[in-house]
Amino acid sequence: MAATDVSWRALGTLTAAKMVVMPAFGAATGIALRSSGLVRQPAAVLVAMIVTCTPTANNVMVMAELAGESREALAAAIFVQYAFAPFSITLWLYLYIHIATGGS
């Protein structure tokens, strides 16, 4: 499968799942950690949420190549995520800091 065989719809769905849905679960986790009192340090809550909003790592390319999967398709998916990342990460970090600091 070449990169041109990957539909924009598939790339958009993958990017939305990784850059919108997963960070939303991260925000929910942060809210749960703060409201339960299990984690009292705002920095720990912030780190727990930040790991959910970053794009797929480039080392996944190496794993895909070793497994015989399509490098081109995965490269296209990673490219779209990294193109979207500056916007989504900025928004998620704003929300995450608000959650981690208790809204202050």
Image (tube, grey):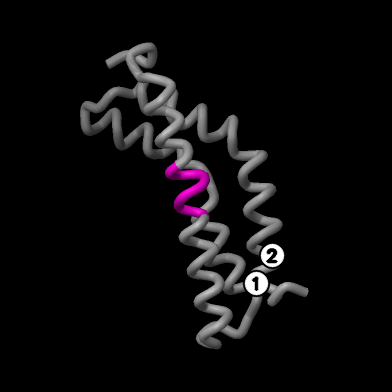
Point out the stretch of residues depicted in magenta.
Answer: 17-23
Q: What residue is shown with label 2? A: 97
Secondary structure, mark 1, is: helix
Relative placement, left or right, of 2 versus 101 is left
| Pointers 1 and 2 in contact (C-beta within 8 Å) | yes
Rendered location of residue 88, percent (x, y): 62, 44
Q: Which mark is residue 100?
A: 1
| Rendered view: 12 above or below 89 | above
Q: Residue furthest right?
A: 104
User: Crowdedness of circle 2 by 10 Å Cα count: few (<14), some, many (20+)?
Assistant: many
Q: Quadrant of residue 6?
A: top left
User: Crowdedness of circle 1 by 10 Å Cα count: few (<14), some, many (20+)?
Assistant: many
Image quarter where the N terminus lies is top left
Secondary structure, mark 2, is: helix
Is residue 69 covered in magenta?
Answer: no
Magenta stretch: helix, strand or loop mostly: helix
| Rendered view: 36 above or below 104 | below
| Rendered view: 36 above or below 12 | below
Seen at 51% across and 85% down, the residue is 36
Image quarter where the C terminus lies is bottom right
Seen at 72% across and 73% down, the residue is 103
Seen at 45% across and 44% down, the residue is 18
Amino acid type for the residue under numbered disc 1? Ala
Q: Residue furthest left?
A: 68
Q: Quadrant of residue 31?
A: bottom right
Q: Which mark is residue 33?
A: none
Rendered location of residue 46, percent (x, y): 61, 67
